[in-house]
């Protein structure tokens, strides 16, 4: 895959691209990860879905989406015309559903699949596949088989007891790239109502609060991959809001970054990050991103 630049809109924060027309120079982005997609339409979670917290945002959306067939028919043509690389974020409740969804996406004009095995906001499937190496291996193998013609990136959960072991299991089953991290499992309590804010009790925490932890996880995974001489690209995400944030991940060895929550607060954030990276490269007389790596 060739990306115009290393800045990608993160899944669940950019809709299907066209929602940001007029607010963002969409054509300048490296790629767009779609809102999470499931085989059948999902209404999402009941109750409150968004809650702001210190230096972060908690969400319990529940993968609301129109289903993969409707996405391919109605959303993909418009998304395809926007210009950036199109990455379909695929989720499911069981391996059969993941595989069937992957098969439909494989026959479509998307560029790449991001296999979401790390969403903490759904009761079935989701993060359950991303915290156990064996389960991660099984779903990755099934999707790889069903989507032979598309590059496959697996999105990893920071909630896994050993994220590096899960990463290696996915690579062994055919993952072409890895993205990390997804949101951290968290919760909030309404002290006036004396009850949890979210109907599902827990939700996913994103935003600047998680960036130092996400960066550490990317750094440690890169160390493991380098020791094993594994060249699978890693895409870093988690609280990136400005060019210096993105550069930290690139210096740690990430091949690209995804930007999510920052777009809600400041829609032009990704365009500014791209410009900031370009300026930094010029100032340091660097001609390619790999020259940034500290190791």
Image: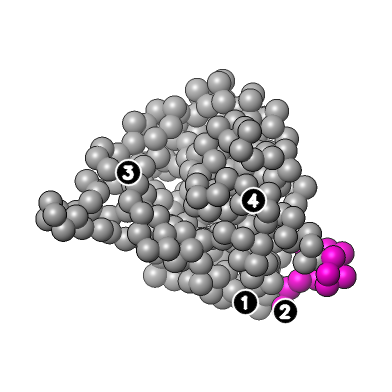
Q: On the rendered image, what quadrant is the C terminus found in?
A: bottom right
Q: Looking at the image, which is closer to me, 214 or 116?
A: 214
Residue beneath the point at 55% across and 49% down: 266
Q: Is residue 250 left or right of residue 282?
A: left
Q: N-terminal of the two: label 1 or label 2?
A: 1
Residue beneath the point at 27% across and 59% down: 187
Query: Is residue 280 found inside the magenta-colored segment of the image?
Result: no
Q: N-terminal of the two: label 1 or label 3?
A: 3
| 4 and 1 marks in contact (CB < 8 Å) | no
Q: Is residue 75 visible?
A: yes
Residue stretch rendered in magenta on the structure: 282-295
Q: In front of the other: label 2 or label 4?
A: 4
Q: CA distance from mark 2 to mark 4?
A: 26 Å
Q: N-terminal of the two: label 4 or label 3?
A: 3
Which label was assigned to residue 270?
4
Q: Which residue is mark 2?
A: 295
Q: For the residue labelled by badge 4, is the local secondary structure a helix, a strand or a loop?
A: helix
Q: CA distance from mark 1 to mark 2?
A: 9 Å
Q: Is residue 169 left or right of residue 150?
A: left
Q: Is residue 136 visible?
A: no
| 1 and 2 marks in contact (CB < 8 Å) | yes
Which label was assigned to residue 49?
3
Q: Which residue is mark 1?
A: 223
């Amino acid at each position: 895959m060739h990306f115009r630049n290393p800045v990608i809109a993160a899944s669940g924060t950019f809709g299907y691209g066209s929602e940001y027309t007029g607010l963002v120079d969409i054509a300048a982005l490296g790629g767009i990860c779609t809102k999470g997609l499931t085989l059948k339409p999902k209404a999402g979670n009941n109750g409150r879905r968004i809650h702001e917290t210190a230096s972060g945002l908690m969400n319990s959306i529940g993968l609301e989406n129109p289903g993969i067939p409707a996405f391919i028919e109605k959303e993909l043509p418009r998304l395809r015309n926007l210009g950036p690389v199109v990455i379909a974020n695929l989720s499911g409740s069981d391996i059969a559903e993941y595989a069937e969804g992957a098969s439909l996406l494989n026959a479509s004009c998307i560029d790449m699949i991001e296999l979401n095995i790390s969403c903490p906001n759904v009761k079935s499937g989701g993060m359950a596949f991303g915290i156990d190496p064996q389960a991660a291996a099984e779903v990755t193998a099934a999707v790889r088989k069903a989507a032979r013609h598309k590059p496959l990136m697996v999105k990893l959960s920071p909630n896994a007891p050993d994220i590096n072991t899960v990463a290696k299991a996915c690579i062994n089953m055919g993952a072409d790239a890895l993205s990390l991290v997804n949101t951290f499992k968290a919760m909030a309590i309404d002290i006036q109502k004396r009850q949890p804010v979210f109907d599902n009790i827990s939700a996913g925490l994103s935003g600047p609060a998680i960036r130092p932890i996400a960066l550490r996880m990317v750094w440690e995974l890169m160390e493991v991959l380098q020791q094993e001489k594994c060249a699978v690209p890693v895409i870093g995400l988690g609280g990136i809001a400005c060019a210096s944030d993105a550069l930290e991940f690139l210096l740690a060895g990430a091949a690209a970054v995804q930007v999510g929550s920052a777009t809600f607060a400041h829609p032009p954030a990704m365009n500014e990050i791209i410009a900031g990276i370009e300026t930094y490269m010029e100032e340091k007389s660097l001609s390619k991103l790999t020259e940034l790596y500290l190791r």
